[in-house]
């Protein structure tokens, strides 16, 4: 069975529609999944007219429910009005409201089991803020919606690196107070589990970065390594995890040491994302640790590129392919673990003299 993939259009004034239109125009997509865009057909058409002629005649199968999605078609569920103001390249309140409307509807269908995975186009974290969305991004919103009391992990994935974060969209001044042994252990546990279950790595090797320059230089440049990070790594090792560090980020990435590990756990956003995006701008943002599957491109709304037919859809396409792969892997894992063979030890019928 082909997975049904929900795709939210994100901020209508950014590059969301452009990258999704370019991505789902690939005929191979409809061969491996049933895509459903959560947005608006008229606004999608307006964006299509800013692209090359091959996109001008793009059409959608308008549906009311995922159950109506047709195989081989680009399906669309309308989430906001045709007259929603479109101001390409600008941040507006209406764009934030439209982004939230498509996200809410897609999440509801995901909760109901009507779609199998979620791919989110970029939102503006500022204009989407309202009574119904008081979060610093997709990751935090989805954790609240689907976490069921558990936490999640923001993870960036590419062919050359996997990087996860201890703190997500946190102001730098607040990061040190959020670095605790318990939080590091929690993130290491989620990271180890997702590497095993979603990426099929039996014994993942995880590198843990330091917080301070030169890993604190034995307390000269900070005590977090000695008092928090090292004890967390040691406790993780005692529980069976292959965690190593803490490593000073500059030397670790400069020397290419990241190539010796299956994943890296960074302490804060820019510590992980600067080297990640410096090496690959076509990576994927994956929300690990939740029962649902959510991926997204690793960039923002890019208002400066919107409407100019210059946005690169590769990160979006990689996010879509990864969502499909993750769904298939989880399905295969569930099948393998269903009704496992029982090991029966025969009784020893021979009595020793």
Image (cartoon, rainbow, N blue to C red):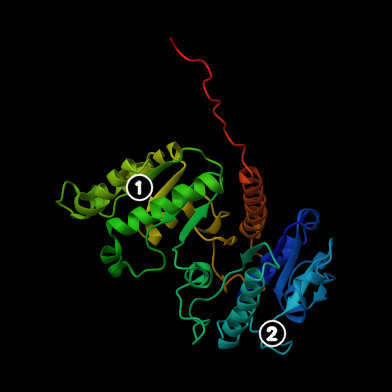
Q: Quadrant of residue 51?
A: bottom right
In the rendered image, residue 262, in percent from the top left (x then y), is placed at 47, 42
Residue at the location (51% across, 50% down)? 194
Crowding at mark 1 (Cα within 10 Å: few <14, some 14-19, many 20+): many
Residue at the location (48% across, 15% down)? 351
- When the figure is inspected, residue 70 is found, relative to residue 89, above or below; the finding is above
Residue 80, numbered label: 2
Q: Is residue 144 left or right of residue 12?
A: left
Residue 208, numbered label: 1
- Residue nearest the viewer, comparing 291 with 264: 291
- When the figure is inspected, residue 238 is found, relative to residue 223, above or below; the finding is above
In the rendered image, residue 335, in percent from the top left (x then y), is placed at 66, 46
Residue at the location (60% across, 83% down)? 95
Residue at the location (75% across, 57% down)? 33
Q: If the image is split into quadrants, where does the C terminus sit?
A: top left
Label pair 1/2, CB-CB below 8 angstroms: no
Q: Is residue 29 left or right of residue 351?
A: right
Q: Quadrant of residue 259?
A: top left
For marks 1 and 2 on the same chain, the one whose residue lies earlier in the sequence: 2
């Amino acid at each position: 069975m082909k997975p049904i993939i929900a795709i939210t259009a994100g901020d209508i004034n950014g590059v969301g529609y452009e990258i999704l239109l370019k991505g789902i125009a690939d005929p191979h997509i409809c061969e491996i999944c049933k895509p459903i865009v959560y947005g608006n057909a008229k606004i999608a058409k307006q964006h299509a007219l800013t692209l090359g002629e091959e996109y001008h005649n793009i059409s959608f199968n308008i549906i009311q429910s995922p159950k109506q999605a047709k195989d081989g078609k680009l399906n669309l569920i309308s989430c906001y009005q045709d007259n929603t103001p479109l101001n390409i390249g600008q941040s507006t309140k209406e764009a934030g409201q439209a982004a939230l409307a498509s996200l809410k509807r897609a999440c509801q269908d995901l909760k109901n089991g009507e779609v199998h995975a979620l791919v989110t186009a970029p939102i503006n974290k500022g204009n989407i803020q309202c009574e119904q969305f008081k979060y610093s991004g997709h990751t935090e919103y989805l954790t609240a919606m689907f976490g069921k009391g558990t936490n999640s992990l923001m993870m960036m994935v590419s062919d050359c690196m996997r990087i996860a974060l201890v703190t997500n969209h946190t102001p730098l001044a607040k990061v040190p107070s959020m670095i605790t042994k318990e939080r590091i252990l929690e993130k290491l546990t989620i990271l180890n589990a997702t590497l095993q279950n979603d990426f099929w790595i039996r014994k993942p090797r995880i590198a843990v970065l330091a917080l301070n320059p030169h890993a604190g230089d034995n307390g000269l440049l900070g005590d977090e390594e000695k008092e928090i990070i090292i004890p967390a790594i040691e406790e993780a090792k005692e529980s069976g995890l292959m965690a190593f560090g803490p490593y000073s980020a500059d030397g670790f990435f400069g020397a290419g040491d990241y190539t010796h590990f299956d994943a890296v756990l960074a302490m804060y956003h820019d510590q992980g994302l600067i080297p990640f995006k410096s090496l690959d701008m076509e990576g994927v943002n994956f929300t690990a640790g939740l029962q649902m599957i959510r991926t997204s491109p690793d960039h923002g709304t890019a208002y400066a590129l919107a409407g100019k037919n210059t946005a690169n859809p590769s990160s979006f396409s990689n996010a879509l392919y990864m969502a499909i792969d993750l769904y298939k892997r989880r399905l295969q894992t569930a099948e393998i673990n269903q009704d496992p063979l029982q090991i029966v030890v025969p009784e020893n019928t021979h009595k020793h003299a």
